Image (spheres, coloured by chain):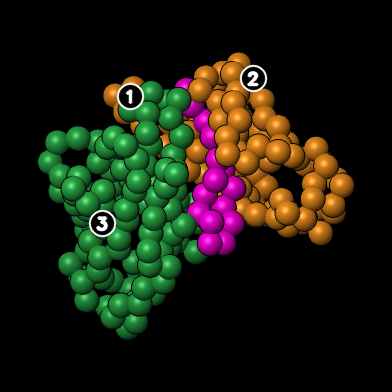
Chain colours: A orange, B green
Amino acid sequence: TAGITQAPTSQILAAGRSMTLRCTQDMRHNAMYWYRQDLGLGLRLIHYSNTAGTTGKGEVPDGYSVSRANTDDFPLTLASAVPSQTSVYFCASGGERGDTDTQYFGPGTRLTVL
Amino acid sequence: AQSVTQPDIHITVSEGASLELRCNYSYGATPYLFWYVQSPGQGLQLLLKYFSGDTLVQGIKGFEAEFKRSQSSFNLRKPSVHWSDAAEYFCAVKLVRGSTLGRLYFGRGTQLTVWP
């Protein structure tokens, strides 16, 4: 099974440009999450979605937006990238029947903003 | 402030030696507890989790963790480390049980180096 896929694997982006990071899961999980990972800081939650059609802000939402049009997809958009958004971005999903508390992670997208 | 602490940023052990990675949390109630492993260039893989019941939980790859309520700790252990265990390890907690509304709070990670 594919689990969670993310695209692109890596990207170099000029400051001021926009970009959408894609995330797709095939596990029919209700909840999906976006985290960013920075050296020495662990993972921090950017946005989340408890179910299709709803989204919420996490710990570091500024400069990012998300949408959840269906169960499987949860894209993350940077409207106008800044160098501080250089990071590794992980998408996660969770909410399996019988275990709503475990989250499963995608392989990540490494983004460099110059 | 609520937090998850992994006091060791970097640990080096010899192959075959035992391993213990520390994790402490500071929350009012017992949260759900997780350990994830991240190999270089990879995503996070769930090693094990504690929700309730037996405080010693077994995970994949020969890892185990023990929940100690009195110490607010959830330390990860392995009796004999293999070179392939070299990776970064993250402790995480979730405060809201039985609901997808709860987010994961992560520690800053412990980088494990294994000497041959």
- Work out how far the residue at label 1 is from the one at label 3, CA to CA, in angstroms: 23 Å
Q: Label 2: few (<14), some or many (≥20) within 10 Å?
A: few
Image point (26%, 57%), residue name: B76
Question: Measured along the vertical axis of the image, is residue B29 above or below residue B23?
Answer: above
Q: Nearer the viewer, residue B73 or A77?
A: B73
Q: Label 1: few (<14), some or many (≥20) within 10 Å?
A: some
The disc labelled 2 sits on which kind of residue? Ala
Q: Tell me the residue that label 3 is attached to.
A: B75
Q: Tell me the residue that label 1 is attached to.
A: B98
Q: Is residue A72 visible?
A: no
x%, y% of residue A65?
A: 70, 32
Image point (61%, 30%), residue name: A57
x%, y% of residue B23?
A: 32, 56
Residue A83 position by quadrant: bottom right
Image point (67%, 25%), residue name: A67
N-terminal label among 1 and 3: 3
Element marked by disc 1: loop
Q: Is residue A65 visible?
A: yes
Magenta-tinted stretch: A30-45
Return the residue found at the far top.
A53
Q: Nearer the viewer, residue A14 or B108?
A: B108
Question: Measured along the vertical axis of the image, is residue B13 above or below residue A59?
Answer: below
Q: Chain of mark 1?
A: B
Q: Which mark is residue A51?
A: none
Labels 1 & 3 near each other (Cβ < 8 A): no
Element marked by disc 3: strand
A44 magenta-colored: yes
* Left or right: residue A11 compared with residue B36: right
Image point (35%, 46%), residue name: B26
The disc labelled 1 sits on which kind of residue? Gly
Q: Main secondary structure of the magenta part?
A: strand
Q: Which mark is residue A69?
A: 2
